[in-house]
Image (spheres, rainbow, N blue to C red):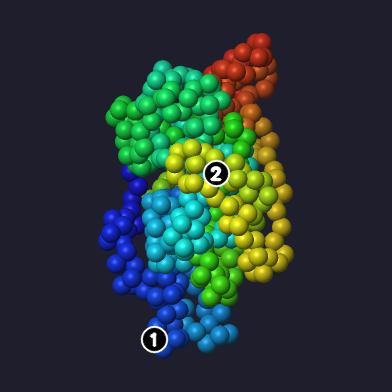
Amino acid sequence: MFRARRPLFLPLALLLPLATACGGGSDAGDASDGKTVTVTVGYQSKTINTVTAGTLLRSLGYFEEELTAQGRKDGLTYRVAWQDYATGAPITAQMTAGKIDIGSMGDFPLLINAARGKQLKEPTRLVAVTGYNLRGGLNTVVTAPGSPLRSLADLKGRKVSSSVGSASDGTLVRALRRAGIDPAKGVRKLNQQPSVGASALAAGSVDALSQFVAWPGLLAYQGKATALYDGAELNLPTFHGVTVREKFAERRPAVLDAFLRAQRRATDHLRTRPVAAAETVAKETGLPAEVVHLYNGAQGIATFDPALRPELIAALKEDVPVLKEAGLVKDVDVDAFVDAAPLRRALPDLAYPKASLPKPELWLKGQASTRTFDSPAQLLKAVKGAPVRAAYVPDAVTGTPWFADRAVWVADGSRWLAFMTRSGAERYVAGHAGSRTFRYADAVRLAS
């Protein structure tokens, strides 16, 4: 489904000797003369909410620039070895083997990273955040187009593909419980990698797919899926972050500082040049730029900032019981895992970005920037007859941006509202007499 940048997804048994041969972590990678240090960074190019610590950061070369400057101070030569993985699990395996120094992954995998590190006496620390959504909108449950399923309650007794141990599986478990369904017995859950689950959904061998960024958006963009449940309905933050081996952080604090400064530079680039950043990530990953922008754009689902916000740490603590119930961890001391000292040291002026509600957004073909609108009705009028590359609109209740042509539209008097899911639109219509749902094409025609 994705165009791979290079054949990086090897079995773990092959990856371990490969990492050792190419210099692995700094403990094994220092040259014999003590003048060369190899820093190994594990990242997930397809998990695009980690791009400021992975794909985008790598393409911009900011980490290498910061290390070159550091080398002029301490007389060392630094080399960065980037290793790309499909999920956070192999990054954790490599970190606990002392072969990856810095890694990035989602909140649930971060907890497993912490637990495995402690268990294997190779402790790790959470030192920064990449992308987050304070309501949980990064995870989505989707069904095939034309599916008879209209709400999460309809999943009872159905087959659902999910990746156990991921944040999206946590969303599924919590959402099913809210719908009155036992997540262990009420559905037939298949533990599958995202690409396998996407294929299963297309083949009709599962009824729904619960996945993390960017799979739901990609499948919706391709016309292969329809949103059934927006993770933001849980109103519980979800995020991705940066983890580091404790031994490495203690031995090479200047290198960790350089990474955090470089990550902030990549974050600033993403904020000031969101379309260019989306194009860069698309080129590196094979994802459509329109999908990358849905999540990472200025009006996107994710907010990017390295700060370890208290809301995110509180949510991380609430995730622990879900993983314990699944038998994936025994316990995690979140307070011991989170280490804010490196950020304070490297970025003393770091402040939380101001929260703002996303606006409808239009990306026209051939344009290097986008337009935003104050209302969905303005967006509908602007797209008629225009060479649209992508149009985005926030859900009227959760605020989660979605593709305008994949949203369910509602007319309530002179107002136009958009909903990510049909169930969301139907709940609104049920509570607002005279309102009606419309297809996107009809909404464009009538609003204009």
Residue 81 percent across, percent down from the top left: 41, 69
For label 2, the SS is helix
Q: In which quarter of the image is the C terminus?
A: top right
Q: Earlier in the sequence, mark 1 or mark 2?
A: 1
Q: Mark 2 points at which residue?
A: 320
The x, y position of residue 8, in whole percent, is 32, 58
* Whether residue 46 is situated above or below residue 140 in the rendered picture: below
Task: Please indicate whether residue 336 sits to the left or right of residue 243 in the image.
Answer: right
411 shown above or below 80: above
Is residue 157 in sight in this rendering?
A: yes
223 is higher (above) or lower (below) than 366: above
Residue at the spot 40% in from the left edge and 40% down from the top edge: 163
Q: What residue type is labelled 2?
A: Val
Label 1 environment density (alpha carbons within 10 Å; few <14, some 14–19, many ≥20): few
Find numbered disc 1 in the image and state the secondary structure of the residue it sits on.
Answer: loop
Q: Mark 1 points at which residue?
A: 32
Marks 1,2: beta carbons within 8 A: no
Residue at x 56% of width, y 25% of height: 178
Query: In the rendered image, which quarter is residue 120 located in?
Result: bottom left
Q: What residue type is labelled 1?
A: Ser
Q: Which mark is residue 384?
A: none
